[in-house]
Amino acid sequence: MMLLILAMGFGALAYGAASGRTSLTPGLALDLEGGTQIILTPTTSDGSEITNEDVDQAIEIIRQRVDATGVAEAQISRQGGQNIVVSLPGTPSEETLELVRTSAVLYFRPVLRIIQGSAAQIATAQNEYVASAQASAQASVPATQDPAAAATQDPAAAATQDPAAVPTELSTVTPEQVATTSADLNGDGTISPDPLAATSEDSSSDSWISEQLIYDAYMTDCTSQEALAGQAQDPTKAVISCAKDGSGTVYLLGPADIAGTDIETATSGLETTSQGQTTNNWVVSVEFNDKGTAQFAEVSKRLLSYRDAAAAASTSTTGATSTDAQKAQFAIVLDGLTIMSSGFNSSVTAPITDGRVQISGGFNQASANTLANQLSFGSLPLTFTVQSEQQISATLGTEQLRNGLLAGLVGFALIIVYLAWQYRGLSVVAVASLVIAAATTYLAIALLSWTMGYRLSLAGVAGLIIAIGITVDSFIIYFERVRDEVRLGRTLVVAVDEGWKHARQTIIVSDAVNLVAAVVLYYLAVGGVQGFAFTLGVTTVVDLAVIVLFTHPLMVWILRLRFFGEGHRLSGLDPEHLGARSASTYGKGREAAISAVAGSLARRKAEDRRRAGADPGEPGEDGLDAEDRRRAGADPGEPGEDGLDAEDLEDVEHVEHDETPTRSQAQSDSSTPSGKDGEDR
């Protein structure tokens, strides 16, 4: 199972690398790769004093913005009291840099006018049409007609010709002419700075704008880089705002109704219908705080009235134009640029009073996530000036990374040597588990770097090195539990199963403690310490998966091999290492094991008597004296058929007798007939 998961994971990683979506190697953090550093100088729009609380709040919001884009291991700190230093690893996207650079004050504003294109674009389009029409008119004159005859042709006869053949008199225009014509609402030929007549007593009234503001809106080119740079705007006045997507749409917006600070949460997800069914349409769900809820209730009531008025006007036969359809929308403005404008669909028939709004509009997953992030972290208490922006080199560099990896390899090699000395052939299981754990950890880090922008720091490398000890510790716990079961007289197969049941509980508890420590450390720390906690948590989960899905199945499988199953002296499962006292541990090798134990006891007994020089009598050639032979019921110095005298057999029988309950249990597990004790002895 574990090998299958690895194969699928590396296959996905290879596909991502081949398609250019990711790299086969994980991304590196600032300390190992370098990146981009931006120094921001905060200012206030009203010139008031900047407090430490303002700077701290700004740092927190910038950190939330950066984290939401998937950039990990970013460093955000204060410099010189008020300046904020933002260091982003690698080569961050332009969207991420824009989130850091801009002050991004967010407001909900009512829409007063929507202008599709600037006066320059309208003039260019009209002039191109004029040129095309003139060229078509000239081409329609027959080439065989005498120009002189055409000039002397009777006007009355010309008038009887097809009107379509005679082009209408058109002329070119300038952007100023287009803007003047569109903004001169009263037709007096002048552009007045005075407010228009009031249409209501709210933020959607025409009294907030003037002919001059409309003229300026037409003269604004919202496709230029200057216009798309954004700027701080007064929330108490009507403003000109460009569409942030660069489409060139110009918005005339009334005073702000709701500030971004009144947004409680904003999340993206698939739309859920009133029946509880999930569609494939991505939406952004916004929830306001108490203040924002009350304000949005008033806004929704006003916009719904404009929507209904626009619907009524569309069915009217008077042909009069109305701006109600445009006023039925509200715009979300971020740092002076309109992220989107939206109205209410037909299913909304009453004002929204619970403060929960669902925004839809042809989003995909990426655009929905972007809008949710902008709404969640859009409002900063300060505006910023970019003091400097530069590329920075790695603070530690690849040499430290190489040294860290070398330290890990040295530790890995020392662990292999220790395992081979302590567990002999069984160390193959531990080494294989370590290799699988290393491959799984590498795959996890690489996939996380691809999917969520994770970057590996030197602190993270330290977490990976610690993972070696965690994996080895799990194996040692498992093997020692197997040894304990064998000492209790269980067969090797049963001991592996029973040992796993007990070791599994210990391993799960141990990994759970490590995981809780990693989670707590991650949420309480910042910067490099978070990187260490993250890799520690990942490797702990990997260790649990490897011990369950690989180590235990491999341990069960190797018992099928004679080298391990019959307890070869180099296997690590031999009686000496396991401390086996029952011959039934190895099944088929029972007789040989008992004979070895019995022979060993007899030889040690005889050796002890020779050293002690026991009396009466001198020992014979076999190391036994006359008294020993008389007690055994045999002639002095004459061994039995099995090569042991009576006292030695009595000692062996005593050992067998002491172990009878344990051996009987083991024989029952391995279905060995109990009547074979005498034969074995």
Image (tube, rainbow, N blue to C red):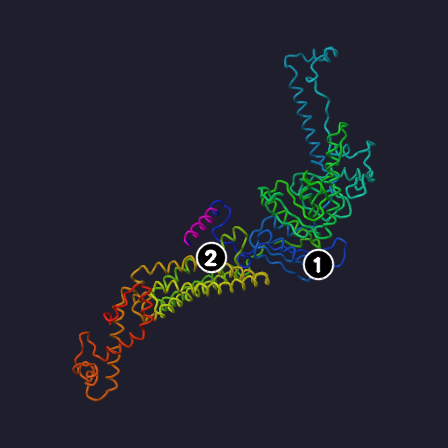
Count residues near mark 1 (Cα–Cα under 10 Å), then give few for <14, some for 14-19, many for 20+. some
Residue at x-position 55% and y-position 52% = 452
Q: Which residue is mark 2?
A: 441
Q: CA distance from mark 1 to mark 2?
A: 41 Å
Q: In the picture provided, is 320 more to the left or to the right than 529?
A: right
Q: Quadrant of residue 134?
A: top right
Residues shaded magenta: 2-15
Q: Secondary structure at mark 1?
A: helix
> Of residues 609 and 65, which is closer to you in this image?
609
Instruction: Tell me the amino acid under the disc marked 2.
Output: Thr
Q: Quadrant of residue 228?
A: top right
Q: Quadrant of residue 598?
A: bottom left
Instruction: Tell me the amino acid under the disc marked 1.
Output: Asp
- Percent position (x, y) of residue 323? 75, 35
- Percent position (x, y) of residue 406? 45, 62
Q: In the picture provided, is 612 more to the left or to the right than 347?
A: left
> Of residues 271 and 396, which is closer to you in this image?
271
- Tell how many labels: 2
- Percent position (x, y) of residue 301? 74, 43
**Image: 547 above or below 119:** below
Magenta span contains residue 4: yes
Q: Secondary structure at mark 2?
A: helix
**Image: 606 above or below 545:** below
Q: What's the magenta bit mostly, secondary-structure-wise? A: helix
Q: In the picture provided, is 74 more to the left or to the right than 56?
A: left
> Of residues 440 and 546, which is closer to you in this image?
546
Q: Which residue is mark 1?
A: 54
> Of residues 572 and 486, which is closer to you in this image?
486
**Image: 580 above or below 167:** below
Counting residues from the start of the chain, the first of labels 1 and 2 encountered is 1
